[in-house]
Image (cartoon, rainbow, N blue to C red):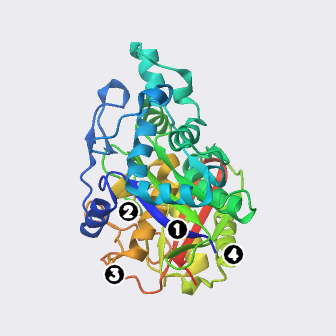
């Protein structure tokens, strides 16, 4: 069984696990707010920002100096003792690094093109840079690579790290991801008419698009006993459309069903579903339909993107980290917020929480559905 030894995280809810947990319980995200920095024409939209200071990249690794990598360093700092102990125990060649991102150092590239950012190096924006940077920072010699499958990237990083360990190619793995606010994704979603001008409202009547957020989370995983385990996972790629979900949710159904089978669970044994829930018209409609088909209305579910924003390539690991918090701390399940806009009553009943509730069955499913029908689902629960 692959278990999770340590987790570091930061996003619009807070700058470390304690802050994130406290604000998740209160339904309050200090980093969510109106923002006129990124959208062309200085038009306002809402974003989910990391508000705390970030560590500086060491001079010896200046070629990797990006906000993305500094977010990774901030997450790593929270679990550095456990990581150092793991390296000392199994050796630098037996610890893998698998990360997910969609922006990498894209903002630095934008600044270079727009304003001639001094000291810019092309490596800062390469998609492979986050894992390369983290491996060099820690002096690791094991497998190190980055996945970029849009919004499923870091969920797949966790799956890939687990596979490396199962295959005997590593004893431990640092998995996770980071994504940073930048102009391209904000204006890209705006051009698709999928960017909300206000805080996103998943599964609401007048939902009109996503709120983009930034953040990072890292997990140290290995074959240990006790604690929280990666009980199962599922992946699929239906390739129905470059940006729209399959109309019947076929790929999502396959990924969730695979995750349940690999965990040896029946749908009614799941205690909470962290929905992908982007607040776009189609995503929420199809996901509600999928959950209703597989689970009915009996499993508590909600999207947390109104609290973190959509962290794009970091969303999968960021939301899995919230699931880990729910399993390791006495936190209520986060309800869907319909204070701005009422629930869309035309959606199939799918267990949406409208008030905080305790976690009953200690098993959490986290969904990540990406462009191109690239789907990844994770199930966390107590290690047997």
Q: Residues within 10 Å of mark 2 (few under 14, many from 20)?
A: many
Q: Position of residue 57 (x, y in %)?
A: 41, 33
For label 1, the residue is 4
The answer to whether residue 292 is seen in the rendering is: yes
Circles 1, 4 touching at the beta carbon (< 8 Å): no
Q: Secondary structure at mark 2?
A: loop
Single out the mark in the foreground, 1 or 2.
Answer: 1
Q: Is residue 314 above or below residue 122?
A: below
Q: Which mark is residue 204?
A: 2
Residue topped by disc 3 = 357
Query: Quadrant of residue 126 in the image?
Result: top right
Residue 167: image location, x then y, percent: 75, 62
- Residue at coordinates 57% horizontally, 61% vertically from top-left? 89
Q: Nearer the viewer, residue 256 or 25?
A: 25
Q: Identify the mark nearer the N-term, 3 or 2.
A: 2
The Cα–Cα distance between marks 3 and 1, rounded to whole angstroms, is 25 Å
Query: Which mark is drawn over residue 326?
Result: none
Mark closest to the chain's N terminus, 1 or 2: 1
Query: Which quadrant does the N terminus fall into?
Result: bottom right
Instruction: Report how far apart the C-alphas of labels 4 and 3 lie in the structure.
Output: 27 Å
């Amino acid at each position: 069984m692959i278990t999770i030894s340590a987790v570091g995280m930061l996003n619009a809810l807070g700058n470390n696990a304690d802050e994130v947990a406290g604000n998740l319980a209160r339904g309050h995200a200090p980093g969510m707010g109106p923002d006129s920095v990124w959208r062309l024409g200085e038009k306002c939209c809402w974003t989910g920002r990391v508000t705390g200071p970030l560590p500086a990249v060491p001079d010896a690794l200046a070629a990797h100096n990006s906000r993305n990598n500094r977010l990774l360093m901030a997450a790593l700092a929270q679990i550095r003792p456990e990581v150092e102990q793991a390296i000392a125990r199994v050796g630098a060649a037996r610890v893998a690094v698998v990360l997910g991102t969609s922006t990498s150092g894209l903002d630095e590239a934008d600044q270079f093109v727009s304003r001639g950012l001094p000291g810019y190096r092309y490596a800062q924006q390469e998609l492979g840079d986050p894992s390369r940077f983290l491996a060099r920072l820690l002096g690791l010699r094991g497998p190190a690579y980055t996945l970029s499958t849009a919004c499923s990237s870091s969920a797949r990083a966790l799956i890939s790290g687990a596979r490396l360990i199962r295959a005997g190619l590593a004893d431990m793995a640092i998995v996770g991801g980071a994504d940073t606010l930048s102009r391209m994704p904000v204006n890209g979603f705006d051009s698709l008419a999928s960017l909300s001008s206000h805080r996103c409202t998943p599964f609401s009547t007048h939902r009109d698009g996503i709120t983009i957020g930034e953040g990072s989370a890292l997990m140290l995983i290995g074959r240990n006993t006790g604690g929280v385990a990666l009980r199962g996972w599922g992946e699929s790629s239906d390739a129905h459309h470059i940006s729209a979900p399959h109309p019947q949710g076929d790929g999502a159904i396959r990924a969730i069903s695979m995750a349940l089978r690999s965990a040896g669970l029946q749908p009614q044994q799941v205690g909470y579903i962290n929905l992908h829930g982007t607040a776009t018209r189609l995503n929420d409609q199809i996901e509600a339909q999928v959950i209703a088909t597989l689970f009915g209305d009996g499993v508590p579910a909600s999207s947390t993107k109104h609290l973190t924003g959509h962290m794009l390539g970091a969303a999968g690991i960021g939301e899995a980290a919230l699931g880990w918090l729910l399993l390791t701390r006495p936190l209520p399940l986060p309800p869907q917020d319909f204070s701005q806009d009422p629930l869309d009553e035309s959606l199939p009943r799918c267990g949406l929480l409208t008030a905080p509730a305790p976690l009953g069955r200690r098993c959490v499913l986290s969904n990540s559905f990406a462009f191109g029908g690239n789907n990844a689902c994770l199930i966390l629960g107590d290690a047997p």
